[in-house]
Image: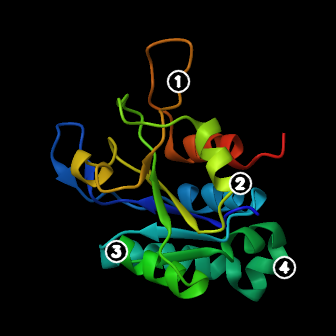
């Protein structure tokens, strides 16, 4: 049995470049592209978490357009991808929706670009998920990453994606696609 997988894109609590804790803005590209990656890999739900009502309004307008009849006629694949997208105030709202759907709380998996001693490999998490029927919520941060105290409350911290050099600052939509491929690809 394979665990049901959900994702969340968190715009809070994240670091600003200066180390302050902030809420980042929602970008339409993240809505589209991460939803497309999620749908490709069979993710059950994609939660966009932002407590700012102006940002939620923007996201709901974008998602609503692609879910409309006109959006579906123009690009059905985008409509299909965004059918799993949910805009929520807080992560707890998404967790409650998953718990209602699955009957139990999800295992919280967090991603980070920072090296940590307590991180796990993609292969070990992939094996764990193959032998588990509990839901997993894979969370991605924006800005300069999710704050450390948030990471420490999660069940699993994934190792960072590393290239051959020292530079490590992928866009969240690129990182999400790579991580989903590493965890869910049938290769």
Of callouts 3 and 1, the N-terminal one: 3
Mark closer to the observer (2, 3): 2
Residue farthest top in this picture? 165
Q: Secondary structure at mark 1?
A: loop
- Which disc is residue 65 wearing? none
Identify the residue position indicated by label 4 in the image.
Answer: 73
Residue that mark 1 sits on: 162
Please tell me whether mark 4 sits on a helix, a strand or a loop.
helix
Which quadrant: the N terminus? bottom right
Q: Name the residue: 56% across, 41% down.
A: 175
Alpha-carbon span between mark 3 and mark 1? 30 Å
Give the CA distance from mark 2 to mark 1.
24 Å
Residue 24 falls left or right of residue 2:
left
Give coordinates of residue 88: x percent, y percent.
Answer: 42, 78
Nearest to N terminus: mark 4 or mark 1? 4
Discs 4/1, front: 1
Residue marked by disc 2: 130
How far apart are labels 4 and 2 at the CA level?
A: 37 Å
Taking the spot 18% from the left edge, 51% from the top edge, the residue there is 21
Badge 4 or badge 3: first in the primary sequence: 4
Rendered image quadrant of residue 67: bottom right
Pointer 3 residue: 90
Q: Residues within 10 Å of mark 4 (few under 14, many from 20)?
A: few
Q: What residue is drawn where x is 64% and y is 40%?
A: 178
Mark 3 nearby-residue class (10 Å; few <14, some 14–19, many ≥20) = some
């Amino acid at each position: 049995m394979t665990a049901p997988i959900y994702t969340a894109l968190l715009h809070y609590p994240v670091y600003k470049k200066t180390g302050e804790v902030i809420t980042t803005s929602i970008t339409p590209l993240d809505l589209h592209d991460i939803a497309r990656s999620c749908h490709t890999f069979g993710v059950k739900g994609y939660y966009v978490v932002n407590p700012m009502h102006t940002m939620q309004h923007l996201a709901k307008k974008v998602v609503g357009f692609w879910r409309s009849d006109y959006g579906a006629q123009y690009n059905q694949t985008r409509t299909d991808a965004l059918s799993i997208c949910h805009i929520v105030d807080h992560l707890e709202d998404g967790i409650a929706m998953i718990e209602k759907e699955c009957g139990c709380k999800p295992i919280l998996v967090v991603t980070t670009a920072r090296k940590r001693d307590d991180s796990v490999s993609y292969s070990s998490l992939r094996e764990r998920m193959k032998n588990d029927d509990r839901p997993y919520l894979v969370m991605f941060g924006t800005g300069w990453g999710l704050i450390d105290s948030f990471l420490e409350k999660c069940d699993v911290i994934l190792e960072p994606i590393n290239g051959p050099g020292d530079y490590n600052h992928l866009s969240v939509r690129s990182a999400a696609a790579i991580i989903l491929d590493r965890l869910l690809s049938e290769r």
